[in-house]
Amino acid sequence: MSATVNVSSHRDDRRTLVVVFLRGAADGLTLVAPIADDNYHKFRPRLAVKKEDAVLLDDVFGLHPNLSALRPAWKEGDLAIIHGAGGESDTRSHFEAQDLMEHGGLAAGGWLGRFLRARGPAESPLSAVALAPTLPESLSGAPSAAALQSLEEFAIEDRRDGKAKPDFGRELQRLYSLEKGPLNAAANNTFEALRRMEAIDPKAAPANNAQYAANEPFALGLRQIAQLIRADVGLDAASIDLGGWDTHFTQQTVIEPLMLKLANGLAAFRQDLGSRMASTTVVVMTEFGRRVAENSAFGTDHGRGGAMFVMGGGVKGGRVHGGWTGLKPEMLEDPGDLPVWNNYRNILAPVLARHGADSASLPGIFPDFDVKPLELF
Amino acid sequence: MASRREFLITGASALAFSGAIFHATQGWWSNVRQYAGVGLSRPLDGPLTPPRDAALDPVAHALNRFTFGPGPGDHARVTAMGVDAFLAEQLAPEKIDDSLCDRATARFAECWWEQLGEAYEEDAETLSPILRRAALLRAVYSQRQLFEVMCEFWSDHFNIDPGKGDARYTKIYDDQHVIRQHALGNFHDMLHASALSPAMLWYLDGRANVKRSATEKPNENYARELMELHTLGVHGGYTQADVMEVARCLTGWTILAKKNDGFSGNYLSPIKDRGKVVFRKEAHDDGPKKVLGQEIPAGLGEKDLDRVVGIVAAHPSTARFIATKLCIRFLSDDPPAAAVETVADAFTTSGGDVKTTLRALFSSPEFRGSEGAKFKRPFHFVVSALRATNAETDADRGIISYLERMGHVPFRYPTPDGYPARAQHWHATLLWRWKFALALANNRINGTHIERKNLSAILGGDAALMATTLNRQPNAEESDAFLKSGDGLALALASPAFQSC
């Protein structure tokens, strides 16, 4: 008997969106530095990325050298960068800005949750996961969303507690096999997803010689997301955070190791997924950028526009999108911030469209906002 | 009072201690247990005979639908009194002693403010947990089960996710004064209260629906949902013109805000007045209007709202829409047209009396014959499992995290249509139900506890425990599976039969 298993429908049909949130307001001008802009070096005499150190992107920009692991994705056209990205609110409060961004404005539920709701009933118990202790607000309102610390939780009995009850699973499956109709199909889906999870060997080496940092939570989280994608368990969306970007003091000592984690993690993830990257999109976002001018403590304060990254199949990569107009003082927003030229919704909308959101559902996903999607795909 | 209230909310462990001293003569340990969220299971002092039939008998069916699931002894009790008397009892909740539930929710009693402004004194982050914990505790422990079932129904019907703006401060007031006040009352009155609920004015932007100049356009959000979701239904016969006219009627109603938001005037309200609903005449469009064919003359001012509520509440589409939703909740996912007609008639002839409408539904021929046809939503599933096992729970993170995985945390549905009622939306939650069943049966949920061995012994063995849990005698396959599984109680709770009601 072959089970009707939605989670195993054609691989190409299932696209997975991975959202990486850099909590604490990452400094877009260090990640993606306008190294050819003289004003940049004037505003940042001590903190600017030096031209000779940067990973050159185009005539204006260079990546911080600690992001060099992203160079292959950029060169091969899989990585797009959007500068001057952020929200419409000029609150410079982390909490408020994250809250607004994750809700998608002054709205109930999260943008990712509403996107998943708009797609209809979840097919898989693992349709949406957060590799985190609790669900992020962006996933609030999703039809089914699990905050997992470890994939081993995804088993009838937690595989970590060593109390496997094979008799229980067998008898449970027997009772559900006696059911008819949708409940039978739903149970089959679930047992099939479980079987695929069991087939994942958490200790197996990643594919394609991908190298994830050992004992590093962000890398571990990305690795588990890659395992879920490879296992075809029906993953539509995954959320993962990388925190600690609030660099008011001695910015370089804080941001440099973080950038390594970010770039090395994303590069390993892309390597690991290989051709599956064609049906995967990674979005990297942060609540706002940081003040253009450095402060007296070798740090930067809360600003407005930041940088976002979109990596994955079909993206118009190898380009910095978003209408950069330079750092001339008169172009900045009071009190000296990079303006937000690109509302985060206009960046997320084309991503969601690639993941199946039709234009009719966009107003519901981003209410009270006239969405003008960037041409990212 | 403020300091005491803060104390109540923030100092749970300290409170346990002070409670212990205060009630020293009554046994301090029981109080510590109570405030730690335990010590709340029902005393099992009546006859506990489980159902004897192989199918769901009429008593089991009534328990499945009028309640969030039977606990030990419920079947025997309702068998003794009869289903009709049970329904009569449940439709008069004010006469039911509910001391166990009162005790379970006592720690939140000070949050049911009379003065809405008091809510703003609280840290918003503490308010949502209070609301959902109270809902879960009431569903588990209240004897006024049908009332609580209807509170859940109306909370979805008039859904407000407190995640939006000041709804985080004002949803508790809505829960008290709209949903719970009218859950078994009159639909028109509930609708009127909802239209003027500060949380609703926030959630659906009514507060921003103003007409202060010739060019200003009203905000149509609430006007549309009022007809599409609260009354007539999407194909109930209203037009875009009706939406715009209703929006005009409701201009000027706003709430006093935390900060000047441009809608409540330049009045910066003192904290005690925050959240208060006011009518701003200067922001009201006082011209003549026409709503669903009925003329509303110019100059009625704030009375426009009464007229609109009256027109939509009495519209025939509203009776059909509410009847359909009730039948989907209490009969089946695709209820027979005849049943909907019966219920809609009762709604209309009684002028929207909820009790009369429910009586018609439960006495319809279609109600008998719908046994086991409903797939429990996750909240219902979790509560019914807690009730079946006579569990003690603090309704806190441990149990909420399971509801989170199943996508059914109370008061966290983002859009105004409320959590879906039909089974298809919830089928992907099976795995988390199974894990919950195992965790509950084996006491692995933080803040929740069952006395499994005692329960089995008191009921007269595992066979009786299974029959109590399933609300009927298990069939041969089930009995066999329970025996072979190594964990009969967990399997009963995880079984297909327990997912339905």
Image: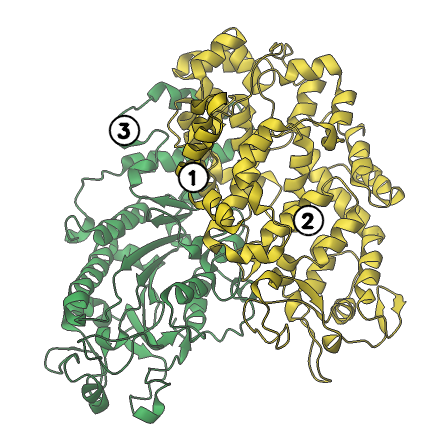
What number is the disc on residue B12? 1
Secondary structure beneath disc 1? helix
Q: Residue at (50%, 61%) from the top-left corner?
A: A357
The image position of residue A265, as x and y in percent, is 21, 58
Q: Are marks 2 and 1 in contact (CB under 8 Å)?
A: no
Q: Residue at (48%, 38%) from the top-left corner?
A: B429
The image position of residue B283, as x and y in percent, is 72, 76
Residue A360 appears in view: no
Q: Disc 1: which chain? A: B
Residue furthest left as drawn: A52
Instruction: Tell me which corner region of the image, top left, top right, bottom left or bottom right, holds residue A375.
Output: bottom left
Q: Which residue is mark 3?
A: A161
Q: Say which colour chain A has.
A: green
Q: Where is B190 relative to B198, above or below? A: above
Instruction: Tell me which corner region of the image, top left, top right, bottom left or bottom right, holds residue A25.
Output: bottom left
Query: Which chain is rendered yellow in the image?
Result: B
Q: Residue at (51%, 49%) from the top-left corner?
A: B128
